[in-house]
Image: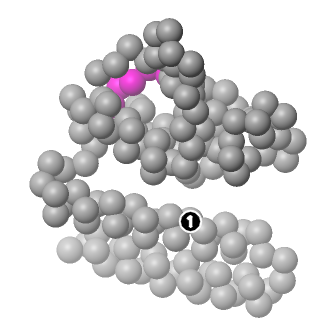
Amino acid sequence: MTNSSLTLISHPLCPFVQRVAIVLQEKNIPFEQIQIDLNNKPNWLLAISPAGKVPLLKVERDQDRPVVLFESMAICEYLEEVYSDHPVHPTDPLTRAQHRAWIEFSSAMLMDAWGYLNAVDETVATNKAADFRKKLERFEAVLSD
């Protein structure tokens, strides 16, 4: 455990922010949350986010200078390591690796869903919907085993 103050910089509809928020809540880690408008990104966000994206986790420790973490998986790994008293992943290395692989698979599913929802023409929408459907079917098959 650590004496850090955490601030999650987020957008309410971002699934990658939700991934971090779920880990924070599952581990009962106190944090503040700042919502931003992704269509009107504030200059301070662009100054601290290398890609201008969310989520970001600002970590303030005692007298240290604040550190901003980016990329949801990196943030989640940090939280898992620092707040290890309530793990969200299994302790067995093989099972933990399987969990992480399916998390990456779900990221690809989210990108297909986003591509479908934001498609500018019918062909792209149809292709993205088919890709998304295939991944969902695969995921459902694994969950039903």
Q: In the figure, residue 55 lies in which quadrant?
A: top right
Q: In the figure, residue 103 lies in which quadrant?
A: bottom left
Q: In the figure, residue 143 lies in which quadrant?
A: bottom left
Q: Residue at x 63, y 33 (%)?
A: 9
With respect to residue 42, does 72 lie above or below? below
With respect to residue 45, does 7 lie above or below? above
Q: Residue at x 80, y 86 (%)?
A: 122
Q: Residue at x 25, y 65 (%)?
A: 98
With respect to residue 132, does 123 lie above or below? below
Characterize the local packing of mark 1: few (<14), some (14-19) or many (20 or more) Cα atoms within 10 angstroms. some
Q: Quadrant of the C terminus?
A: bottom left
Spot occupied by residue 47 in the image (x, y as percentages of width and height): 76, 36
18 on left or right of 116: left
13 on left or right of 6: right
Residue at the limit of the structure toward the front, as seen here: 64
Q: How is the image coloured?
A: one colour
Q: Which residues are magenta?
A: 27-32
Spot occupied by residue 73 in the image (x, y as percentages of width and height): 45, 51
Q: Residue at x 58, y 33 (%)?
A: 68
65 on left or right of 29: right
Residue identified by numbered label 1:
110
Residue at the limit of the structure toward the left, as seen here: 92
Q: Which of these two is toward me, 92 or 118?
A: 92
With respect to residue 143, does 56 lie above or below? above
The answer, for residue 76, to whether it is visible in the render is yes
Element type at marker 1?
A: helix
Q: Quadrant of the N terminus?
A: top left
Q: Which of these two is toward me, 100 or 22?
A: 100
Spot occupied by residue 84 in the image (x, y as percentages of width and height): 24, 32
Spot occupied by residue 40 in the image (x, y as percentages of width and height): 87, 42
Q: Is residue 67 magenta?
A: no
